[in-house]
Image: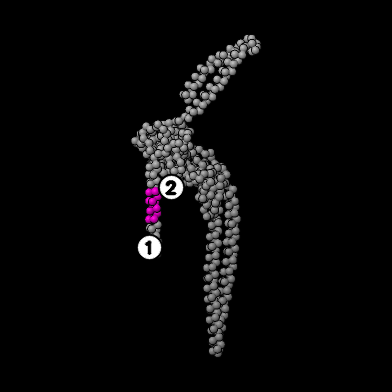
Amino acid sequence: MLIFGTVNFQFNEILLPFEKLRLNFLFKCESNHSINQFDMNRKKQLIIASVSIALLLIIIYGLSRKSGEELITCKVQKGSIEVKVHTSGQLESENSENILLPTVLSTQNVRVYEIKITDLIEEGTVVDSGQYIATLDHKVVEEVLTQARLELEAAMVIVEDAKLDSNLSLSNYRDLITNSRSDLEERKIVLAESVYESPSVIKRAEMDVAKAERKLEQDIKGLVMRQRQVNSQMERRNIDFRLKEKRVNDLLQVYDALIIKAPKPGMVIYARDRFGIKIQVGSVLTPWSPIIATLPDMTRMISETYINEIDIAKIKVGQKVKLTIDAFPDKELKGEVISVANIGQPMPKSDSKVFSVNIRVFGSDPDLKPAMTTGNLIQTGVYSNKLYVPTEAVFETDSTKFVYRKTSRITRQIVDLGEENEDHVIVNKGVAEGEILLLNEPEKLEDIETVGWEIYQEQLDRQNERQKKGNQTEKKDSARQTNRIRVKQ
């Protein structure tokens, strides 16, 4: 660029006489009103000047093309480097009280398994204990109550019919017993009158008396068995009647439970259903998804965030975190990682996976509200006396990572890298403090020599060693599993 500027300056000095000549020429042409009055020498001079200017422009363009490659450089630095992972999250309460669907709705007597919300206070409203929260659909309970009353009336009719049937049946058995007793008395009289008869007549009379006694005994036992049967049937019908009566009474009491009230003071935050949609007026609640809203504990807040699978290995419980709030850019809070998920989950419309991480926010702030967006800067490590370079200085292929070192010539240096943050990366091998590196790729890459193949070989050896250890561990695990199977057999 400096060469180009110098050439431009010299070019302007060269052009200045020609420009003056051109202006004088035009001035004379206008004053004399005819260009034909000038002699041919003046024309030749103008033609020569124009050709000279054209040649000079071509030379300048060629010089600028040769000096057009601009190399941006940096130096290898040595010192302390702090490795951080930056992610965004959402504020949530660590502890909260759930406002649930009344359990009485799903009891055996009531059996209301789905109910709609017909009214709900605005989210973010601060309520006191016992204050109104929501209203559930009364029509569902009314429909169930109507059906329960019909069932109760039917049960009452069955009980009354059973009483009539039992009375009639027992009356018949009592009549049979009365008749059997009368018959027995008659047989006894006949036996008494046959005392002077022949032995055969007396024997027949005795047999008739015995037969009448057995008949009376059977009728009495039949009455007892029938009474037990009737009592059992009546008890079953009475139990069914009492259950249906209790269900009607419970449904009448459920009306009070359809008005949902706050169990304690707090700020109302709508819950989400199994599809992640916020509960609202018209939402349907079930015993399997019974949460209407929550009352978070605003004194203990956490930031729920998600870390990609590349950085999750750096995140550990107990690491310090600096938090910023998008709604309050001037606020800076401190916290620490309290939990890291063991299982990842896919990101929507992406093949990559993320892991849930919870960060506890130290202290409390009245300005903090659930669902506020946070910026989380997780400090994963501080490394002292390390060589590090800007991340832009590192280039890579499928198998190697390298930098462009600039000395008397440019070389492609293979490097062994360590931890990195958003701006810098630690270099374990391949460079020295103060060396000049390129931040952009130079031209004519095919002419640049690659050095540091011993570093690449060390990386391959480490990779093979890790793979060998992994295979040995798999073999040991397989052998243990085989031994267990043999022992069981």
Q: Residue 274 in the image: x percent, y percent? A: 52, 47
Q: Amino acid at mark 1?
A: Val
Q: How many marks?
A: 2
* Residue 13, label in figure: none
Is residue 102 shown above or below 420? below
Residue toward you, 202 or 327: 327
Identify the image's colour scheme: rainbow, by chain, secondary structure or one colour.
one colour
Q: Which residues are magenta?
A: 464-476
Q: Residues within 10 Å of mark 2 (few under 14, many from 20)?
A: few
Is residue 180 shown above or below 194? above
Q: Amino acid at mark 2?
A: Asn
Q: Residues within 10 Å of mark 1 (few under 14, many from 20)?
A: few
Verify whether residue 467 appears in magenta: yes
Asked which secondary structure carries label 1, the reply is helix
Residue toward you, 239 or 387: 387
Is residue 403 shown above or below 183? above
Depth check, mark 1 against mark 2: the one in front is 1
Residue toward you, 121 or 237: 121
Q: Is residue 159 left or right of residue 460?
A: right
Of pointers 1 and 2, the one earlier in the residue sequence? 2
* Residue 487, label in figure: 1
Q: Residue 174 in the image: x percent, y percent? A: 56, 71
Picture quarter with the C terminus: bottom left
Which residue is label 2 attached to?
342
Q: Residue 405 in the image: x percent, y percent? A: 41, 34
Q: Residue 265 in the image: x percent, y percent? A: 46, 40
Say which residue appears at 46% left-offset and 37% top-offset.
446
